[in-house]
Image (cartoon, rainbow, N blue to C red):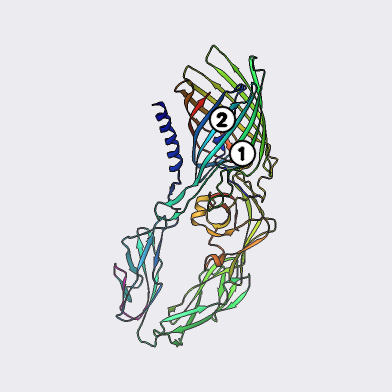
């Protein structure tokens, strides 16, 4: 009888050993700014034509939710929009149509309504680069198209700076960088608005100095810079960090290890101290210098931050 | 040298102290099969602050034995025959996104040693032990490479134990202190502990307090790694309850925590087992 009891106890041990397995940590998604996303940002219509814009709402966890949007037009005499996002062109001219959910106003759709097929329907400006040094000048190009995509000429061309203290633009589309910062330029031909180009003035790079976290080590300097329209992250030759297997460099907007792991941009693993560079544009297309606030050294498997550098 | 992650280091130790100043005596012995469980989502960083981590779990099944070789000499062994260490998967509640976990099953690092008892007839009995830490465990395990059931280094510990019995009162006290010489650039350690036990007829509750102090003479924080396994420090109280089913066989259960720690998990650790004396 006693032997049977002992056998039972041993079997319990074996069962416990065999059933030991990994579990799951259930976490809230990181908090982000809610946003509304549209499937188009421009519509060109003839009078009486219709098009429908679809909007998606992403909540504070970045999760898409079905919500009732309220749609509005800035020029209802030209363009109307119903509560399903259906746009109707009433007469020639332009308007902006945008959705709203609670306090969140979505991006606008620029709607141009043309009276004839040869009227200007779309204006496009372009630039050879988007980063300017202080006092640097650059000429922008501008073209106009009709509703069929054919190039046409207009009568009156106007240029606009969206922040005149940072950028100045003259009547010929020559932009001058006046102060450090980010500002946009757009144009109009015969009242039809173009796309907008954002320019970063002055700093073509952001610098940071690592601060150790939690008793681990991360010291040295880091530079995030634009080189030939690619964003490159360079760890300095003075860079030193603690290492674990799975030590990664991240760009992130938080220094919390779990948040960095879930929402940061993983640039790759490092196994040695000293200078090293990462092509951020390869990791994420269209990334800009200001998309992320921190460079974080993370033990990725355990989500432990060894240190971070704030980019300034 | 590779980096190792010894999140499970903390609370494997308080339960098997190779403890007390008494020798087993020739032909006598003690053997326990035990299961050790720790699971934690908090970690004591090197500066002693607690940080959130992906949950680490460790289940270890092993043997602990003491065998009387002669009147004064006792052989010691602590052999984790099966260690399961895992890193939880992560699932995000709102988006449903998941990050896979990781797991390692392997044998653990094993301690063997010899304890020499002296002054065994005195009011305070003494013993000194040499314990060798054999790196049988696996390092750099799992898909992530950070799981391990051993630290990969061969260490040698010398310790001194002193005990006193208040017989006929059912009380005894023991204390020990030791020096753990670690290789492969791990920092050496001072280890210390105290316990008080109440050996009633078949029931023996024991309160233990044990700690590790790193001498910080290893290359911690170097690019050679050892980050999580080196410079471990803690002060850990433990409560152990032993119950004799008969004169030879008994059950044991224990729980331990940490009053403070560095480079160790912050979690309760549970241990239970069945033992036989002869």
Q: Is residue A256 visible?
A: no
Label 1, on which residue?
Answer: B232
Q: Is residue A235 left or right of residue A44?
A: right
* Tag 1 subunit: B
Q: Is residue A286 magenta?
A: no
How packed mark 1 is, by other alpha carbons closer than 10 Å (few <14, some 14-19, many 20 or more), is many
Q: Nearer the viewer, residue B147 or A166?
A: B147
Expressed as whole percent of the image width and height from the top left, the position of residue A284 reads: 52, 65
Which of the labelled discs sits on residue B1, or is there none? none
* Tag 2 subunit: B
**Magenta segment, which residues?**
A82-95
Callouts 2 and 1 in the same chain: yes
Q: Secondary structure at mark 2?
A: strand
Number of numbered labels in the structure image:
2
How packed mark 2 is, by other alpha carbons closer than 10 Å (few <14, some 14-19, many 20 or more), is many
Q: Is residue A86 magenta?
A: yes
Q: Nearer the viewer, residue B26 or B171?
A: B26
Q: Is residue A232 visible?
A: yes
- Give the residue displayed 67% in from the left and 36% down from the top: B156
In this rendering, the label closer to the viewer, 2 or 1: 2
Expressed as whole percent of the image width and height from the top left, the position of residue B106 reads: 53, 45
Q: Nearer the viewer, residue A252 or B260?
A: B260
Q: Nearer the viewer, residue A4 or A76?
A: A4
**Going from the N terminus, do you reach mark 2 or mark 1 first?**
2
Question: Where B177 falls versus A86 (above or below)?
Answer: above
Task: Find residue A312 and report its image quarter.
Answer: bottom right
- Give the residue displayed 63% in from the left and 72% down from the top: A135
- Give the residue displayed 60% in from the left and 27% down from the top: B193
Expressed as whole percent of the image width and height from the top left, the position of residue B119 reads: 67, 17
Q: Secondary structure at mark 1?
A: loop
Label 2, on which residue?
Answer: B65
Q: Marks 2 and 1, Cα distance to the nearest angstrom?
A: 25 Å
């Amino acid at each position: 009888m006693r032997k049977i009891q002992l056998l039972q106890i041993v079997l319990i041990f074996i069962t416990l050993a065999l059933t030991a397995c990994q579990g799951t940590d259930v976490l809230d998604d990181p908090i982000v700014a809610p946003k509304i996303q549209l499937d188009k940002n421009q519509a060109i219509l003839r009078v009486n034509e219709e098009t429908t814009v679809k909007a998606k709402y992403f909540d504070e966890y970045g999760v898409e939710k079905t919500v009732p949007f309220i749609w509005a037009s800035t020029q209802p005499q030209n363009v109307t929009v119903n509560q399903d996002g259906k746009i109707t062109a009433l007469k020639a001219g332009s308007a902006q149509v945008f959705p709203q959910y609670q306090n969140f106003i979505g991006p606008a759709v620029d709607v141009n309504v043309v009276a004839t097929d040869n009227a200007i329907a779309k204006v496009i400006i372009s630039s050879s680069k988007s980063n300017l040094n202080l006092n640097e000048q650059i000429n922008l190009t501008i073209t106009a198209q009709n509703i069929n995509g054919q190039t046409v000429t207009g009568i009156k061309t106007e240029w606009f700076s969206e922040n005149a203290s940072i950028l100045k633009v003259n009547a010929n589309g020559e932009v001058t960088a006046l102060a450090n910062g980010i500002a946009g330029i757009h144009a109009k031909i015969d009242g039809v608005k173009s796309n907008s180009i954002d320019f970063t003035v002055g700093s073509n790079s952001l610098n940071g100095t690592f601060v150790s976290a939690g008793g681990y080590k991360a010291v040295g300097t880091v530079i995030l810079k634009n080189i030939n329209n690619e964003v490159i992250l360079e760890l300095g030759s003075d860079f030193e960090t603690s290492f674990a297997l799975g030590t990664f460099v991240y760009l992130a907007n938080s220094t919390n290890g779990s948040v960095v792991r879930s929402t940061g941009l993983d640039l790759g693993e490092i196994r040695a101290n000293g200078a090293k560079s990462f092509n951020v544009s390869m990791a994420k297309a269209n990334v800009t210098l200001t998309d992320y606030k921190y460079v974080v050294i993370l033990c990725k498997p355990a989500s432990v931050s060894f240190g971070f550098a704030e980019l300034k | 040298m590779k980096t190792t992650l010894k999140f499970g280091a903390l609370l494997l130790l308080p339960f098997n102290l190779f403890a007390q100043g008494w020798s087993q005596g020739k032909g006598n012995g003690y053997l326990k099969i035990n299961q050790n469980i720790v699971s934690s989502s908090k970690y004591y960083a090197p500066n002693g602050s607690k940080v959130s981590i992906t949950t680490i779990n460790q289940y270890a099944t092993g043997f602990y034995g003491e065998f009387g070789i002669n009147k004064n000499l006792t052989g010691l062994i602590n052999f984790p025959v099966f260690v399961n260490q895992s890193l939880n998967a992560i699932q995000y509640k709102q988006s449903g996104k998941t990050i896979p976990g990781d797991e390692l099953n392997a044998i653990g690092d094993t301690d063997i040693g010899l304890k020499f008892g002296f002054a065994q007839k005195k009011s305070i009995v003494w013993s000194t032990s040499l314990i060798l830490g054999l790196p049988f465990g696996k390092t750099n395990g799992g898909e992530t490479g950070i799981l391990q059931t051993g630290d990969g280094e061969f260490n040698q510990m010398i310790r001194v134990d002193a005990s006193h019995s208040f017989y006929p009162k059912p009380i005894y006290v023991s204390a020990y202190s030791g020096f753990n010489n670690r290789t492969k650039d791990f920092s050496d350690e001072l280890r210390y502990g105290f316990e008080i036990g109440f050996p009633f007829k078949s029931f023996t509750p024991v309160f233990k307090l044990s700690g590790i102090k790193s001498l910080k003479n290893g290359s911690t924080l170097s690019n050679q790694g050892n980050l999580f396994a080196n410079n471990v420090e803690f002060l850990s109280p433990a409560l152990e309850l032993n119950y004799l089913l008969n004169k030879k066989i008994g059950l044991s259960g224990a729980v331990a925590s940490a009053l403070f720690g560095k480079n160790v998990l912050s979690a309760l650790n549970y241990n239970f087992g069945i033992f036989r004396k002869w």
